[in-house]
Amino acid sequence: MDKIVVENLKYKYPLTDKLVLNDISFKIEKGQFIGIIGQNGAGKSTLCQAITGLVPLFFKGAYGGRVIVDGIEVAKSNISDIALKVGMVFQNPFTQITGSKLTVYEEVAFGLENIGLDREEMKNRIDEALNLLGIYKFKDRNPFDLSGGQMQRLAIAGIIAMRPDVIILDEPTSQLDPQGSEEVFKAVWDLKKCGITIIMVEHKMEKIAEYSDKVLLMHDGKVIDFDTPEKIFSRDDLMKYGVIEPAYTRICKAFDIKDNGLYPVTLDRACEMVVKYNEHNRS
Amino acid sequence: MSIIEVKNLHFFYNKDEEILKGIDLIFDEKSTAIIGQNGAGKTTFVKLLKGLLKPTSGDIIIYGKNTKENTVANLARTIGLVFQNPNDQIFKNNVLSEVMFGALNIGMDEKDAKESSLNALRMVGLEGKINDNPYDLTLSERKLISIASIVAMNTKIIILDEPTIAQDYISKEKIKDIIFNLKSQGKLVITITHDMDFVAETFERTLVFCEGKVLLDGKTNEVFMQDEELKKAHLEPPYAAQLCRKMNSDKIYITVEEFVKANKR
């Protein structure tokens, strides 16, 4: 079943002339991991906000077309109802952490208190979220004593405890070191395995290629392509959209090493194909 | 004469937690990347170089000047630091006056400051936006403004703290070109980053910080061959090197270009 349907979506911010989203249509199935790529200014973050309903319910402006999440048209719903279905993780965990809670445990409780859950249910959900993100051992720590990767996982835990069906992450690892960024990708992967639909905006193409079921390529407010990572990164016009293939794909393209007509996009696949290519050339 | 000399540098904010635990380094003109986990002490280290913090013990000598005996204002003519977040740095209401601010502040006259700022804006490709309000520009353009502001001060040393964060491919290439350009003008460029491929493609020398110490120091390609040590610092080599390792190849190449060049016969 389609979890998210976007139909002919158009949007202009107030007092501007340019369509930031220009006739966008696509569908996302439940439980998929969708990567959104494109150069800065392509409309990626605005699209995320349109799925959470912040556009047009909070950010006004000219709006056309429809965004439907779980059968509900977001423009005709309200932000607090959509927030129960769609959770959003920002780029910088400092923006998301409330700053008003003294422990990791209470931080995760914040959203739950706001929706008025009873105590037992809250405890269950907090324990579950902290365990899922691998930060239960830090439950009594001050959120600001965590590392960047731990703090971003806490931000995600706060969202997960709300039990949304969809989680949108807008460049969640750009502020993190390589280890912290890997922690976040692994945690998000575990969420996908629990059946949660994931939408992630990311500039690290190697990671997009490794984790995404499908990749949405955007440029200048439009969807250029929406397909598997292999198909997207096999295109020969990516440069035009300010996007570069994963390093492994660039190497395979240089030697024209294809796998069933498409270039490999992950380390494992590229390694296998390059080794085969070398053996073939030697014999 | 070495450009920067760091001698047995120790630093802590509070006594129980030493941040830098004895660093000895000499910087010459080689462009240098500093990599390492969050919390390894990288940003603290560059703040010490800039004189914003003073060593708890040990010395930092910049072109013969000890940072302990010189004010930040005095050192600012020699060493510039571009902050990680451009919003921490930008406060004027048009691009040109933002970029001129630092140059005027270190005592350049109006005419020189303007000329130097226009050159810097040309270098980062924003010469067409000198009258815009910085906050009408995108985050990546603001990052370029913050770089231009420091370049305009014409210091011999330029430090960039995480220049590639949230930058797309095109902006990253632009920042790479800026670094090459500064290098060709004989400036020492020191850069903190988490982007290993960017390091491999851009810098001659790489320092690995780990828990307040320098774990590795050498030519970038040699540093990225030390898999065991990198693992200790929770770092991974660049993607091309990971592919070489996985293929069990004898030679390790650290960039896609080197890999392709070496294997194409």
Image (spheres, coloured by chain):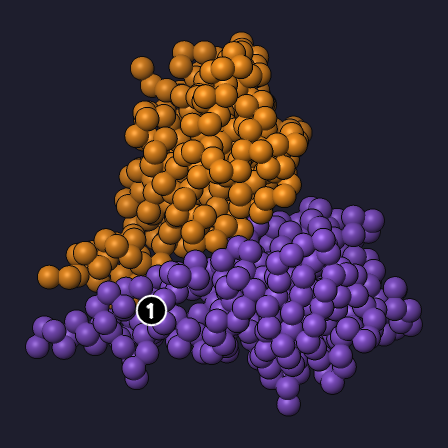
The answer to whether residue A43 is left or right of residue B126 is: right
Q: Is residue A98 above or below residue B81?
A: below
Relative image position of residue A119 (x, y in whole percent):
90, 70
Relative depth, front residue between B192 and A127 = B192
Which chain is assigned purple?
A
The answer to whether residue A22 is left or right of residue A256 is: right
Q: Which residue is mark 1?
A: A236
- Extreme residue toward the left, this view: A283
Q: Is residue A168 above or below residue B80?
A: below
Residue depicted at x 74% and y 68%: A53
Relative depth, front residue between A85 and A101 = A85
Q: Secondary structure at mark 1?
A: loop
- Residue A150 location, quadrant: bottom right
Subunit bearing disc 1: A
- Residue A24 location, quadrant: bottom right
Which chain is assigned orange?
B
